[in-house]
Image (spheres, grey):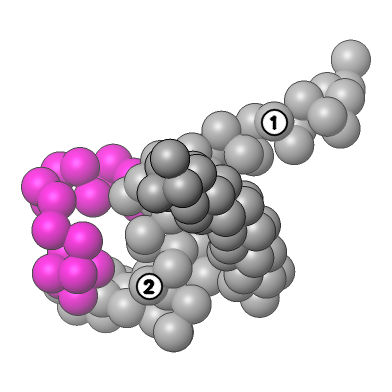
Amino acid sequence: MPVPLYEAKAEFFRMLGHPVRIRVLELLQDGPKPVRDLLAAIEVEPSNLSQQLAVLRRSGIVTATRTGSTVVYELAGGDVAELLAAARRILAVLLGGRQDLLEELRTAETAR
């Protein structure tokens, strides 16, 4: 029996649900990067990065090409960059709302 679309979407978002994976995707928005550059930018253990890259590769969201001993990763499509931009906009609104609430609380405290 085929998987319902909502379950496929949930699985997709679970795949994205790791900070290292999100950071990799953010870095790859600027173009293909070799693993050594990703490692320098993310500052995690090589084995952890390798594991997270494997998840992204298996999902098809990134591709990898090998030239000699260098493996270069890149986004499989531009839609990923759009998704990350949408997430930033949503977070800006959510966190902006919280900032307004925080400011309101501060104002109430000083009015006492």
Q: Residue 106 carries which label?
A: none
Task: Report the number of discs.
Answer: 2
> With 55 as the anchor, is 104 left or right in this view?
right
Circle 1 crowding by C-alpha within 10 Å: few under 14, some 14–19, many from 20: few
Q: What residue type is labelled 2?
A: Leu
Query: Image height check: is 87 above or below 70?
Result: above
Q: How far apart are marks 2 and 1 (CA)?
A: 24 Å
Which secondary structure lies at badge 1?
helix
Q: What residue type is labelled 1?
A: Ala
Q: Is residue 110 magenta?
A: no
Name the residue: 75% across, 36% down.
9
The disc, 2 or 1, on the residue closer to the chain's N-terminal end is 1
Query: Image height check: is 87 above or below 104?
Result: below
- Say which of 73 and 94 sits in front: 94
Circle 2 crowding by C-alpha within 10 Å: few under 14, some 14–19, many from 20: some
Which range of residues does the magenta coloring cover? 36-57
> With 2 as the anchor, is 61 left or right in this view?
left
Q: Position of residue 73 (x, y in %)?
A: 38, 70
Q: Are marks 2 and 1 in contact (CB under 8 Å)?
A: no
Which secondary structure lies at badge 2?
helix
Q: Residue 27 carries which label?
A: 2
Q: In which quarter of the image is the C terminus?
A: top left
- Say which of 1 and 82 sits in front: 82
Q: Mark 1 points at which residue?
A: 10
Name the residue: 45% across, 63% down.
25
Q: Is residue 38 magenta?
A: yes
Q: Where is residue 75 in the image (x, y as percent from the top left)?
A: 52, 70
Q: Where is residue 16 in the image (x, y as percent from the top left)?
A: 52, 44
Name the residue: 37% across, 72% down.
27
Query: Image height check: is 100 above or below 35?
Result: above
